[in-house]
Image: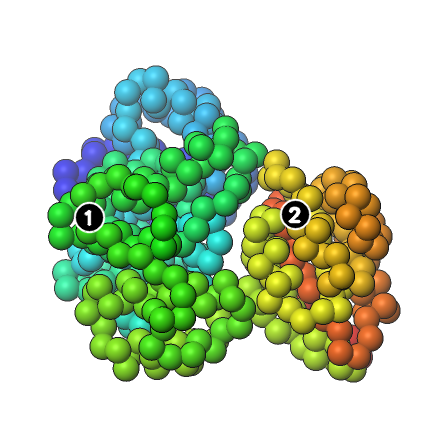
Amino acid sequence: MNLPGRALVVGLARSGQAAALALARRDVDVIAADRAEVAPGRLAAAGVEVRLGSEEDSLLDGVELVVKSPGVPGDAPLVAAARAREIPVWSEVELGYRLLPGHLVGVTGTNGKTTTSELLGAMLEAPVAGNVGRALTELDGKVGEDDWIVCELSSFQLEDIHELRPRVAVLLNLEPDHLDRHASFEAYREAKLRIFENQEAGDTAVLPRGFGKVGGHASRIEFGGDDDLPAEPLIPGAHNRENAAAATAAARVIGVAEEQIADALRTFPGVEHRLELVAEKKGVRYVNDSKATNTAAARRAVAACNPPLHVILGGRGKGESFSELALDLVGRARMAYLIGEAANDLAIALELAGVDHVESGDLTTAVKSAVRDAREGEVVLLAPACASYDQFRDFEERGEEFKRLVRRLR
């Protein structure tokens, strides 16, 4: 690919740093900017000019490309100014796609992306990157032309793709999410479906059975139902059977042997922070589903656990209604413990549904209360149905804190 002489990377979380380093390795003059304080160590050592706490338009002077981290909104001042100057704006995954050899299998959807991506990685014995925690550009120099790469793709990452073309593109499901950032469900849906737009004849779109028309020119394969599975998945829950069916369909398209697929299904243990059994103490099971950052994911977690449940809910809402989640808890939850900014909205929905609840405020208080109330044979479930950013850096930190609190129990 033809690289720019000078590039600006906006947002210096993991993917931003990986993008800046990948460009610097190719002798691109790189500026890296972030509103927050970030340790410049590796970036500065690689010759990257690090600018913190600055959003001045002058950072764009001479810049031929802007690479935007997924956490940076499209209307952020530097990004908007770049578009006004007609400077190309790429997602980090767009840069990764252009830099890396090999074949890409992309996985998107509202829920189940990480589980499906990691399971598919196990089936293919391939690296997994993207929204799972390892940036796609971190694989720079680590894959060959014949290798497959599994890439989990969020709506935020797909907003700014241009040429990214998965040879196999998987859509798991579509339900309202991130409505606090996307203008509407239609805008969110449109971002998700961009995974298909550059596909060509010879590529494959893997879709839920009965899903409507999507863009691109790929052939279409549908999944759904137990008939698609060559073995019983180890991971629990009806939703995970769907995830397993999607991974199986994609692996078959790529040409993975049936026995290799079956072996992965039988042995894959699931991912951290997703229906993760933390401990069983005095007959009470403690389950961490901190990755349930929307109501649809929380409802799946509730359905996957045997009642009676003690459910910890809350965090920063995403503009969703909690009514359906509250109705799912009727007859299943003995008590709900509410934390964070969304506690009041959750309380209203639970009150209307007749579900007992208490506003705990923070996770420590919620866990203490749940431990006090839970009896042998019951489940304490962290399934927040909200983002974590009001009290934690991300859902991983929230899940780790829940596990720490549980493991400290006598």
- Residue at screen point 34% across, 43% down: 212
Q: Which mark is residue 218?
A: 1
Q: Of label 1 and label 2, which has the lower sequence position?
A: 1
Question: Could you say whether the residue bearing mark 1 is in a helix, strand or loop?
Answer: loop
How would you rate the neighbour count of disc 2 (Cα within 10 Å): few for under 14, some for 14-19, many for 20 or more? some
In the image, what residue occupies the spot 45% across and 68% down? 241
Q: Position of residue 105 (x, y in %)?
A: 27, 57
Occupied quadrant, residue 85 = top left
The relative height of residue 283 versus residue 406 in the rendered view (above or below) is below
Inter-mark Cα distance, 1 to 2: 36 Å
Q: Position of residue 327 (x, y in %)?
A: 70, 51
Identity of the residue drawn at 60% across and 67% down: 304
Please indicate whether residue 324 sits to the left or right of residue 125 in the image: right
| Residue 373 in picture, x, y percent from top left | 85, 68
> Of 94 and 155, which appears nearest the observer?
155
Say which residue appears at 50% left-offset and 28% top-offset: 183
The residue at the far top in this view is 84
Whether residue 92 is visible here, answered yes or no, is: no
**Are the residues flagged by discs 1 and 2 in contact, CB closer than 8 Å?**
no
Q: In the displayed structure, does residue 210 sit left or right of residue 29?
A: right
The label shown at residue 104 is none
Front: mark 1 or 2: 2
* Residue 301 locus on image (x, y percent): 60, 62
Quadrant of res 134: bottom left
Location of residue 400 (image quadrant): bottom right
Q: Compare residues 370 and 137 and report the one nearer the observer.
A: 370
* Relative height, residue 159 to residue 225 (above, below): above
Q: Secondary structure at mark 2?
A: helix
Q: Residue 335 versus residue 157: which sits nearer the camera?
A: 335
The residue pinned by badge 2 equals 324
Tell me the kind of residue under disc 1.
Ala
Amino acid type, residue under disc 2 in the picture: Glu
